[in-house]
Structure formats: C-alpha cells, structure tokens
Image: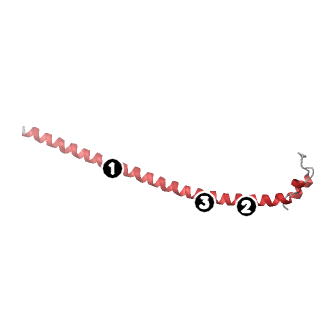
Amino acid sequence: DVFQSHEEDDRKVRRREKNRVAAQRSRKKQTQKADKLHEEYESLEQENTSLKREIGKLTDEMKHLSEVLKDHEKICPLLHCTMNFVTIPRPDALTSCLPR
C-alpha cells in the first residue's frame, strides 16, 4: 500500500513537471508570436508613413504639372489653331510647342 502510494506520488510529480514544462513552452511560444506581430506592426507603420510621404510628394508634383499644363495651354499654338479639327497634327505646329 505504501509502495503504491509512493508510485502515485511519483506519477503526480512527473505529471506536474511535464505540465509545468509544457506551460512554459506555451507561454514562450505566445510571447514569441506577440513579439513577431509587434515587429510586423512596426514595419507596416513605417511603410505606411513612407507611402503617405510619397503620396504627398506626388500630389505636389501633380499640382505643379497641372499648373504648367494650364500655363502652356494659354500659349499653345495647337490649341489656338483655326484648323484644330484636323486629326493629324502638322509637324511644324508640334515642334513649336515642344521645349527647346
């Protein structure tokens, strides 16, 4: 009876130890997963900031180019030509619009 009780105690100790190790492993795995998610979050935040900055630069460039186009349209001989209904542009009129 004492021997059987001692065996049960040993089994309980081994089971507790096994459970403790499994719990530690599980907590470590959870921590690693959380760390990985946090790193991914930080990386995505940096990428998002960078993309917003790029959007701002491209928006500014678009505004600038729109103004340049608007200014050019005021003086472009192709737009003011009385023959602007012709679908094939004349090379001499085109070259006068191109920058030198």
The residue identified by callout 1 is: 27
Q: Is residue 53 shown left or right of residue 37?
A: right
Q: Of the residues under marks 2 and 1, which one precedes in the sequence?
A: 1
- In the foreground, 75 or 49: 75
For disc 3, the neighbor class at 10 Å (few under 14, some 14 to 19, many from 20) is few
* Horizontal and vertical percent position of residue 90: 91, 50
Judged from this view, the residue extending furthest toward the left is 1
Instruction: State the SS at label 1.
Output: helix
Instruction: State the SS at label 2.
Output: helix
- In the rendered view of the protein, which quadrant contains the N terminus? top left
Mark 2 vs mark 3: give the one in front: 2
The residue identified by callout 3 is: 53
How far is mark 3 from mark 1, CA to CA? 39 Å
User: What is the three-letter code of the residue carrying label 3?
Assistant: Arg
The residue identified by callout 2 is: 64
- In the rendered view of the protein, which quadrant contains the C terminus? bottom right
* Horizontal and vertical percent position of residue 83: 92, 49
- In the foreground, 35 or 70: 70
**Residue at image x 89%, y 55%?**
80
**Residue at image x 86%, y 60%?**
75
Above or below residue 87? Residue 95 is below
User: What is the three-letter code of the residue carrying label 1?
Assistant: Arg
Q: Is residue 22 shown left or right of residue 86?
A: left
Mark 2 vs mark 1: give the one in front: 2
* Horizontal and vertical percent position of residue 22: 29, 45
